[in-house]
Amino acid sequence: MYGPLLFFHSIFRWLVLLSLLYGVFRGFSGWMGRRPFTRTDDTVRHLTATFAHIQLTIGLVLYFSSPLMAYFRSNFSEAVREFDLLFFGLIHIILMTLSVVLITIGSAAAKRLDTDARKFRTMALWFTVALIIIFIAIPWPFSPLANRPYIRSF
């Protein structure tokens, strides 16, 4: 049951990260370079938000169907004392959801603004804050919070 979801979860985590990095780059380069907000910029903005929404949906399905997270939710008072469980049961999901909310706000705001400079600035700033939060919430192999290998065999 989890096989296809885990596969798409793995694919979309990288699509979100790469599109967000590219969106930040396009936002700052357009803002600082005073160039026009092109159709490509709008596509990057839109795809970044779309990838983030898909990833959030897959992540929530996995979260609510995971036996480990079911244990965390049913034994909350003792599970929060175990930092790995606390990280994946609470910290990770809250920070990742917050980052998708920030990406959504930045994307929607940039879409509605009237000048190219304001569109780029809005996209650059909101996407950068979301990216920083994502970097904090990722269980990097070197992280003191929780760690996993870069590529897992499941």
Image (tube, rainbow, N blue to C red):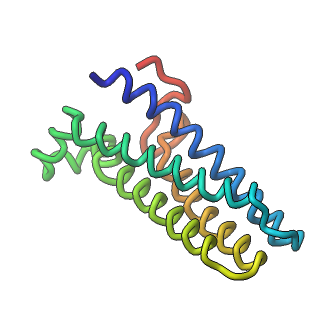
x%, y% of residue 18? 65, 44
User: Seen from this angle, which residue lies furthest top?
Assistant: 153
Q: Is residue 73 left or right of residue 32?
A: left
Of 100 and 93, which appears nearest the observer?
Answer: 100
Query: Going 22% across and 36% down the picture, which residue do you hit?
Result: 65
User: Seen from this angle, which residue lies furthest front?
Assistant: 39
Q: Is residue 133 left or right of residue 84?
A: right
Query: Going 51% across and 38% down the picture, which residue do you hit?
Result: 12
User: Seen from this angle, which residue lies furthest left?
Assistant: 74
Query: Going 42% across and 41% down the picture, which residue do you hit?
Result: 146
Query: Going 69% across and 82% down the picture, which residue do you hit?
Result: 114
Q: Is residue 1 left or right of residue 32?
A: left
Of 14 and 120, which appears nearest the observer?
Answer: 120
Quick check: 151 above or below 57? above
Quarter of the image that includes the C terminus: top left
x%, y% of residue 49? 54, 55
Of 62 and 49, which appears nearest the observer?
Answer: 49
Q: Is residue 149 left or right of residue 18?
A: left
> What is the total number of numbered labels drawn onto the structure image?
0
User: Seen from this angle, which residue lies furthest bottom?
Assistant: 114
Q: Quadrant of residue 1?
A: top left
Quick check: 32 above or below 143? below
x%, y% of residue 68? 22, 34
x%, y% of residue 90? 30, 52
